[in-house]
Image: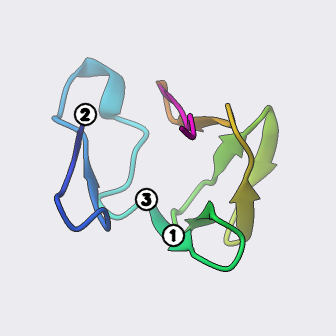
């Protein structure tokens, strides 16, 4: 998993685990007013955030939020 220097795109190298992930699966943006990331699912079948399905919706990510894109699991950790 790589994060572009702009912080606007996360690239996940294609593997056996990425079959359920859309080319553009979600959008991660920084909300400077809240000092937190916002996660917007734009995929065909949805994502999971902290065990709750998110489909065509946006959520604010708290510290240690867990994101699931298909079989890929990510965690947001704030400094």
Q: Callout 1 environment at 10 Å: few (<14), some (14 to 19), or many (20+)?
A: some
Crowd class of label 3 (few under 14; some 14 to 19; many from 20; radius 10 Å): some
Secondary element type, mark 2: loop
The magenta region covers: 73-79
Q: Nearer the viewer, residue 35 or 13?
A: 35
Who's the residue at 56% across and 38% down the image?
Answer: 76
- Is 24 located above or below residue 21 in the figure? below
Looking at the picture, does residue 36 appear above or below residue 69? below
Q: Foreground: 36 or 26?
A: 36
Q: Quadrant of the C terminus?
A: top right
Q: Position of residue 24 (x, y in %)?
A: 35, 64
Which numbered disc, 2 or 3, marks the residue closer to the eye?
A: 2
Label 3's element?
loop
Query: Outermost residue toward the front?
Result: 79
Does 76 lie within the magenta span?
A: yes
Image quarter (top left, top right, bottom left or bottom right) of the N terminus = top left
Q: What residue sits right under mark 3 in the picture?
A: 25
- Hey, which residue is sitting farthest top in the picture? 16
Q: Which residue is mark 1?
A: 30
Which residue is disc 2 drawn over?
A: 1
Q: CA distance from mark 1 to mark 2?
A: 18 Å
Badge 2 local density, few (<14 within 10 Å), some, or many (20+)? Answer: few
The residue at the point 40 percent across, 45 percent down is 21
Return the disc, 3 or 1, that comes first in the chain's sequence: 3
Q: Is residue 15 left or right of residue 77?
A: left
């Amino acid at each position: 998993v790589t994060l572009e220097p702009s912080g606007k795109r996360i690239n996940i190298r294609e593997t056996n685990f990425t079959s359920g992930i859309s080319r553009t699966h979600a959008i991660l943006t920084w909300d400077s007013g809240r000092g937190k990331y916002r996660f917007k699912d734009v995929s065909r079948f949805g994502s999971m955030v902290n065990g709750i399905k998110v489909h065509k919706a946006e959520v604010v990510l708290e510290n240690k939020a867990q994101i699931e894109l298909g079989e890929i699991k990510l965690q947001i950790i704030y400094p």
